[in-house]
Amino acid sequence: MTEDRQNQNQDQNQNLNQNLNQNQNQNQDPSQDEPKHHHDMNLADELGIEDIYDPMVGMDGKVFCTAGRDAPIAEFTDDFLILHPPQKPLDESNRAEDFTLRVDDRNILLDEFGSPKKIPAATYKGCPIYYSGERVPGSMTSYAVAIAHDGSLHALYFDHGRRLTAKDVYDFRNKSEAGELSNFQEIVCDI
């Protein structure tokens, strides 16, 4: 009888354990069964950033650097330095920015307010100098143009034939008195 009793107790224990497992499975949150994917975590967590004492981190063949959990995370690539917000997941779907340039009907570059972009305090024979919508080939550097008193556009050149860029105009303006570029013998313009 004791043997029957032991078998009966074992059967009851097995039934209890089965019921307990079934109840646990029913009450368990299904999301707990699924592993956390990278897109569910913010970048700081994904990289395992805890403090500022280990600033360089690698993941998937990429190198990242940060100054702590709440600081922007820098990704080093062969060509660029990309800053990522630490609170959001790493998003590689939109890796490039689109730059658009607006110009007026005279091909003068417009600023963010839609006004012609002037080089402050720079003149050639008293005529203001603006950013041209024309760029140095292969770059984002603008050429400079002077607008004569009659409204006509005139390119500025070095005496050896190269056109002046907006940066060149800034450099000469800073060397000049009152921003007048016609005082420099190496600058030529047909105004």
Image (cartoon, helix red, strand yellow):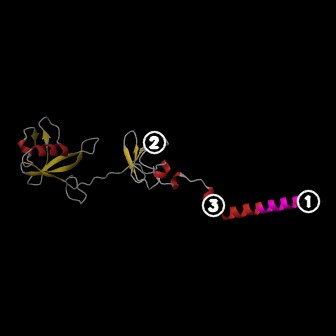
Q: Residue at x 62, y 62 (%)?
A: 29
Q: Position of residue 163 (x, y in %)?
A: 17, 41
Residue 181 vertical placement versus 32 (above, below): above
Which region of the structure is painted magenta? 6-16
Say which residue label 2 marks: 62
Say which residue label 1 marks: 2
- Magenta: predominant secondary structure element? helix
The number of numbered badges drawn on the structure is: 3
Label of residue 30 in the image? 3
From mark 3 to mark 2, how far is it between C-alphas?
33 Å
Q: Residue at x 20, y 49 (%)?
A: 132
Q: Quadrant of residue 9?
A: bottom right
Report if the CB atoms under discs 3 and 1 are less than 8 Å apart: no
Tell which of 36 and 52 is nearer to you. 52
Report if the CB atoms under discs 1 and 2 are less than 8 Å apart: no
For the question of whether residue 90 can be seen, the reply is no
Callout 3 crowding tier (Cα within 10 Å): few <14, some 14–19, many ≥20: few
Look at label 3 and name its amino acid. Answer: Pro
Look at label 2 and name its amino acid. Answer: Lys
Mark in front: 3 vs 1: 1
From mark 3 to mark 1, how far is it between C-alphas?
43 Å
Q: Residue at x 7, y 44 (%)?
A: 182
Left or right of 61 in this view: 104: left
Q: Residue at x 24, y 42 (%)?
A: 136
Q: Position of residue 139 (x, y in %)?
A: 28, 42
Report if the CB atoms under discs 3 and 2 are less than 8 Å apart: no
Callout 2 crowding tier (Cα within 10 Å): few <14, some 14–19, many ≥20: few
Q: Secondary structure at mark 2?
A: strand
For the question of whether residue 185 can be seen, the reply is yes
